[in-house]
Image (spheres, coloured by chain):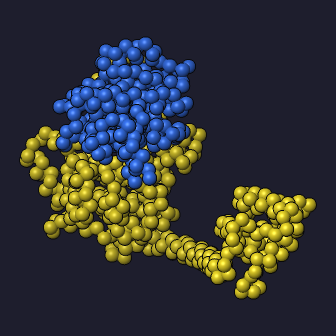
Amino acid sequence: METIWLYQFRLIVIGDSTVGKSCLIRRFTEGRFAQVSDPTVGVDFFSRLVEIEPGKRIKLQIWDTAGQERFRSITRAYYRNSVGGLLLFDITNRRSFQNVHNWLEEAQSHVQPHSIVFLLVGHKCDLEAQRQVTQQEAEKLAGAFGMRYVETSARDAINVEKAFVDLTRTIFDLVRNGDIKIQDGWEGVKSGFVPNTVHSSEEVAKGNRQCYC
Amino acid sequence: MAAPSFLLYIDRSLFARRGKDSRAVEKRDPGWKLFGKVPPREGTIKDPKRIQKEYETKSSRAGPGNLTSPRQGVRKNLDFEPLSTTALILEDRPANLPAKPAEEAQKHRQQYEEMVAQAKKRELKDAQKRRKQLEDRCKLEESIGTAAQTWNQEILPNWSTVCTSRRVRDLWWQGIPPSVRGKVWSLAVGNELNITHELYNICLARAKEKWKTTPAPAIDTETEDADSSDRESSLELIKLDISRTFPHLCIFQQGGPYHDVLHSILGAYTCYRPDVGYVQGMSFIAAVLILNLDTADAFIAFANLLNKPCQMAFFRVDHSLMLTYFSAFEVFFEENLPKLFAHFKKNNLTPDIYLIDWIFTLYSKSLPLDLACRVWDVFCRDGEEFLFRTALGLLRLYQDVLTCMDFIHMAQFLTRLPDLIPSEQLFQHIAAVHMTSRNRKWAQVLQALQKDQERRSPVLKR
C-alpha cells in the first residue's frame, strides 16, 4: 500500500564528478556506505519518505546527476522541475569548491521561471587531515548566495540525515507560507494522498494510522 | 543439510521441559511436536491414552540424563522427512482444553500427511529440475563448442564472402562463442580509421608523457574557462573512473591485472581524439573490449566503435542530435508498444532518462555482462538500430510491471534493471520488435527527423 504523504518534493543533487553525490544519497536512502560505485552516466533516481513533524511525511524524489562537465547540457534540462537542490563539493578537493560558482550560475540560468532552494554541502568531512577548504570560507560563500552550509560524511554517516531533512523542512515552510506554489505542469512539488479535509497534525496522524490497519 | 540452529534449540528445550513435566503430572497431553517427530501411524484412530504412552516412552528417552538424544532424533528423522520442513504442529490440545473429537483428530492427521506428501513431491520436482538444468547446461556447452568450431573453421577464414549470408546471420543471433567473440567484433566493427598498432603506441607514448608532465591538480584554475579545465581534468577523471569500472570484477582496480591496460587505452584515446576526450561511460566500453581482445586491437575497435555516428553524437553530447535519436526511438516505441508509450507520456517519463545510460555504455553497465556481450554481438551485426531495438525489447519484456508503476518507480526500475534477466526471453522480445514504421526503416525515420529539425530551427528544443 502506498504510504500517505503530504507532499512530494523533487530534489536534484549536483556538483563536480567524484565529490560523492551518489554515496551521500545512498547513505540517506539505503542507510549504507558503498565502498565502490559506478560513475553516474546521465541521471539516477532515489526516493525516501521523511517525517518532518509527527505524522507529516514528505516524499523525496532525488535526482542524482552525472558530475562531468560534458554532461551538463543534459543535466541542465532537469533543473526546471526541481524544487530543491544539494550542491556538493569535496572538502579535500579545492577545485570542486571553486566550481560551486559555475554550478550555481548554471542552475540559475536554467531554472527560470521557477527557483531552486539550494543547500551547500561540504562532503567527505571525515577526511579532516586532507581538508583544502575551511568551514569559514564555505560558510561565507554559502551566506553570499543565501544558502545554508552543512558538512557531511557518507562514510561515517555525519549530518547526512540533517542535510536532507533541513532542506526538506525549509522547502516545506515555503510551501506552507505560499511562497512556493504547486502548479500544473511543474514537477517540483506535488501534493500527496491526504484528504482535503485534513488540517491539523493530529488529523494527519489519524489518517496515517488508518492506513496501517 | 544441517538442521537450522533454531530448530535444534526449540527441540532441546521442549524435550527438557517435557521430561520434567511427565514425572510431575501423570496425565497430560503431549503438546507441541516437531513436524518430523510424528511416529508412524499404526491404527486409524488413536485414543489420547495411547498417545500419552508413546509420548512418555519418548520423553523418558530424552530425559535430562540423556541430553544427546534430541539432536540424534532430529538427524534421524530428517532423513526421511522433507529437508525443508521446520514447522511445528500441535498434535493434540493442551491439557487445559477439552480433547479433540476423534474425527477432528483424524482430519488433522490427514492434513498433516497431505502436507508431508506435498513437500516430498516438491522435493522430487526440485531434484528433477536440477537434473534438467544440468542437462541443459551440458547441452549448451556442447553447442557452444560446436559453434566455436563452425566460426573458427568455416566462417572466419571466409569472412568477407559469408558474413552477410543467412546462415551466418542466424548463427550470429544465437550469440558468438566467447572464444571467437573478439575476432568477430573486430571484423564487424572494422577499421575505417586505419589505425595501426604503431599509431596506438604513439598515442600511448604521448599520453604517458602528459601524465608525467601534468602536476597534481592546479589550485588556481578559477580564471580558466570551463572547457579547458574539463579537458585537463579528464586525465585525472580517467584515473578515478578506472577503479569504478566493473568494481565487482576486481580486475580493473588499482593492482588488478587490467588496471594499466584500461588506463592506457583511455589515455591513448584522449591523445588520439583530443576533441572528444574522455567521457564517463567510455571506461565501460573499453573494459568490455579488453575482456575480449588484445590491448592494441581493443584500442582499434574502441576508436572505430566510438567513431560511429550514434556514438559520436552521444559522446560529444551533441544535444540536438541526441534528441533526434530519442524522437526516432519514440516513433518505434509508439508503434510497437502503444499502451506503454501512452503510460510513459502520461507520467512524463522521457526516453533520455533511461536511454542515456544504456546507449553511453552500450548496456554494459545496466545488463549482466554475459547478456550485454550478446547485445554487443548483434549490435556489431546490425549497427546502432539494434541498440534501440534492445531498448524496446527490454520495455516489451517488462511491459506488464511497468504499466503498474508511477514515474519514480519506472525511472528507478529502468536505471537499475533486475539482476537476473532471462536472456532467451529478452532476445525473443527483441526479435518481436518491428523496426519498420509506415514502411520506413530506422535509418529513414532518423534521417527524416534530422532534416525536419534542421529546417525548423537550429536552436535546441529543450
- The answer to whether residue B78 is left or right of residue A170 is right
**Residue B211: percent from left, percent from top:** 46, 30
Residue located at (76% from left, 77% from top)? B48
Q: Colour of chain B?
A: yellow
Location of residue B165 by image quarter: bottom left
**Residue A97: percent from left, percent from top:** 39, 22
Front position in the image: B194 or A2: A2
Q: Is residue B27 above or below residue A122?
A: below
Residue located at (34% from left, 64% from top)? B400
Front position in the image: B156 or B225: B225
- The answer to whether residue A149 is left or right of residue A183 is right
Location of residue B223 by image quarter: top left
**Residue B347: percent from left, percent from top:** 25, 51
**Residue A2: percent from left, percent from top:** 38, 51
Q: Does the rendering let one see residue B196?
A: no
Total marks drawn? 0
Front position in the image: B211 or B153: B211
- The answer to whether residue B266 is left or right of residue A107 is right
Q: In this view, does B348 lie above or below B331?
A: above
Q: In this view, does A192 lie above or below B11?
A: above
Front position in the image: B10 or B182: B10
Residue located at (38% from left, 37% from top)? A202
| Chain letter, blue in picture | A
Q: Does the rendering let one see residue B396?
A: yes
- The answer to whether residue A81 is left or right of residue B103 is left
Q: Is residue B103 above or below residue B177?
A: below
Q: Quadrant of the N terminus of chain A?
A: bottom left
Of all residues, the one furthest to the left in this rendering is: B455
Residue located at (74% from left, 82% from top)? B46
